[in-house]
Structure formats: C-alpha cells, structure tokens
Image (cartoon, rainbow, N blue to C red):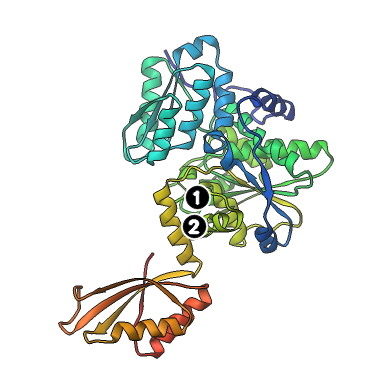
Amino acid sequence: MTTVEPEHQAVARIPSLAEIEDAARSLAGVIEHTPTQNSQHLSEVMGVPVSLKLENLQRTGSFKVRGATYRLSHLTAEERARGVVAASAGNHAQGVALAARELGISATIYMPLGVPVPKLLATRGYGAEVVLQGDTVAEPLRLAAEHAERTGAILIHPFDHRDIVIGQATLGLEVMDDVPDVETIVVGVGGGGLIAGVAAAAKARAKAEGREVRIIGVQAENAAPMPVSLEAGHPVEITTKPTIADGILVARPGEIPFETIREYVDEVVTVSDDDIARAVLALLERAKVVVEPAGAVGVAAMMAGKVHSQGPTAAILSGGNIDPLLLQRIMSHGLAASGRYMTIRIPLPDRPGQLVMVSQVIAGAGGNVIEVLHTRHGQGLQVSEVNLQISVELRGAEHRELVLQALRDAGFTPEVLPD
C-alpha cells in the first residue's frame, strides 16, 4: 500500500483567503492567538515602527503546530486509523505529536541521535513514539518514509503539502489583524511552508483592503537554497553547511510552497551565524523573550541592515525551542560578535607581577576581567614563559579595540581567541 502524499495533484497550489480564514476558525480551539509587541530598539534601528509576533509563545513553542493540526484534521477516518509518521529534529516533531494526541491518532516520530534533550522529552511528553537514529535529519527522513511504506501510516511532511501551508497561513492572518497598518512582514525561510502561508494570507488580505504589503524572507547564509531556486525558477538542491539556525537548515525548498513564494514573496536575504547570535542576544536583553536561532533570523536581518522598509514592519519570531546549553553558547558568541566580550592569550615572562600589570592595563582602559587562566604549559612556550588566558567584558567593538591597543602600548602581544 502506497502512502505517498498528494503534494503534486492538479489542484490550485496557492491557498485562497477563504480557505485560510476557514482554517483559522477550525484551529481556534487548538492553537493560541500569540501576542504581538512593539520593539522600541528595532524601531530605532529601522527608523519605522517595528512589531514582533511572538509565535515562540505558541503551544509546543513554534508555529509548526498550526500546519500539523490542520493537516491531520483533514485525514479520513480510515487514514487516522493507520496512524501518522514524521521525521524532525524538533519543532515539526512536537507539532505532529501534539496534533496527533488532540485528534486521537497514534504517531511515530523519527529523530536524529543528537536531538536536543528538551525537544526529545517534549515530543515524548505529547504521547508520540520516538525512534532515535542517524546523525543528521536525513536518516530519520528516510526511515520515516520506509515506515510509512511498510506500515501504511500517513507520512506528514514538514512543509511540502498544501494543508501544511494553509495551516501556517493562519499566522499571516494574525499578523494582519494585530498590525493593521503593516507594510512589510519579515519571515524566516526553511523549506518554505511558513513564508508561503504568511505571504498568501497577507497578500490576499491586503488586496481585499485595497493596499499592498511586502514579504521579505530570511535564510541562514550556510543553508540558503531559496535565492538560487528563485533565480532558476524551480526548487534547487544545494550543499548546506552547519548553522546555528538548525530549524531552517533545508537543502531544497518544497515544490508546493515554492509556487506561492515565487508569486508573492518580494525578496529573500541571507544572514550569518554571527548576525543570528546577535539577534538572539538582543531579543533576550531588549525584548525579554527567548527565541531559537531559526526564529530570530528576521530580527537578525533587520539588525544587519538587510531589510529596508518605509512603513510599519513586523518580524515573526517563529519558535522558542532552544536547548539551554546552546543558548549559553549563543549568548557568549553574541556578546563576542557584538564586541562586548573577548578572550585573549598573552605570553608573559615567568616572573612576579606580570598578571598584576596586565590587569591594571585592562582596568585602566575600562575593561572588566571576568576569568583568568595562568599556565606554564603550552605549545611553543619557553621554560621562562607562561601563558595568560584572560576573558574581558567590554562595552562594544570600539572599546574592544581600545583595550587591545592599550595592551600593545604597554608592551604586551595579545592574541584574540575564537569564542
């Protein structure tokens, strides 16, 4: 028995406003209408009013529950009895697991061995059977497809299905309701399901109101197949590199969402991991919200000067499921990328008073020493030398250079270490 989903049936690919509004009504008892808040900091950066759509506060911690619930709710009784299967490193897994529990459907989720523990525990907590196998999500995807073929379970794709796009589109309606005068909406892009849905909803609503709205997509530069695909006119598979934004690490856009993206998305830009780390840190400090890297790429693009808007702008914070240990690393990386933290290594002669001298120079330049490692062991050290590794809190990039120059002027040779 085949379980290939009907992604490529001859139906209208781009959802209508009526379909999306009907989906919003059907999901009202399952999903939350997440809050939207103004961002003074980003408004100053952009020069226009900026709002943040806090979808990181959605049930399961991301937008994925919208599409998953809508998709599963359209299964026939016979299909529900066969159960569902999915593969994911986190957010899609949780969305499918919760949707299946709410609808009384058995769910099996394949996840890679290195999946963050909070996401694993949450998926199991929603009642799904979890199978851990493979080092990357590619292996679970293969296994999920084999499971569907073997058992007859329905394979729930994370983005390449029309019902998934329609479910995600309900988020676009909420943005239009929450920010009635919005002119630009910034959305992270992975496989394309979210931005396709948001674009379809926002463009249709704006047209009905006799106005226009711009949709800007953002991808991590290490996993950015969308610009290449748009240029080619069809989905193109690329070779990706590691990125902290693992939630949007996709090598090839989906066929179904791509049609809507090509029709309705005005621009797609890319951001670096440093940009993303700075955005996660800024959201934590300025907005007091915890957002996963993939959910912060819209803000990263704004802060990096990649988004230009003439009027009210909204950024969708699409998820907040971040491992605390990763958050700790990203905070350190974000501080370093912002010039507010650095670790330096300085070779010193092995005699009394050297550590005091270094500390005095840093203090005199306004730096705050927060950690020190003093060792006589290290490659290349002479018998009469020691290595000083020192971490310093700073006020920004200019202050960082001031501290380094003060050390050089005092006769030291500081080497900045990677964070």
The part of the image, by quadrant, that contains residue 204 is top right
x and y percentages locating residue 78 in the rendered image: 50, 9
The part of the image, by quadrant, that contains residue 72 is top right
Assign a secondary structure to mark 2.
helix
Q: CA distance from mark 2 to mark 1?
A: 7 Å
Task: Tell me if mark 1 has few (under 14), some (14-19) or many (20+) residues whose alpha carbon lies within 10 angstroms of its own.
Answer: many
Q: Is residue 227 visible?
A: yes
Residue indicated by mark 1: 293
Is residue 276 found left or right of 261 in the rendered image? left
| Residue visible at 49% across and 70% down in the picture | 339
Q: Quadrant of the N terminus?
A: top left
The part of the image, by quadrant, that contains residue 407 is bottom left
Q: Contact (CB < 8 A) between labels 2 and 1? A: yes
Report the amino acid beneath label 1.
Pro
Q: In terms of sequence position, does the residue under pointer 2 or pointer 1 come before the other?
A: 2
Tell which of 238 and 215 is nearer to you. Answer: 215
Tell which of 80 and 378 is nearer to you. Answer: 378
Task: Tell me if mark 2 has few (under 14), some (14-19) or many (20+) residues whose alpha carbon lies within 10 angstroms of its own.
Answer: many
For residue 277, the mark is 2
For residue 71, the mark is none
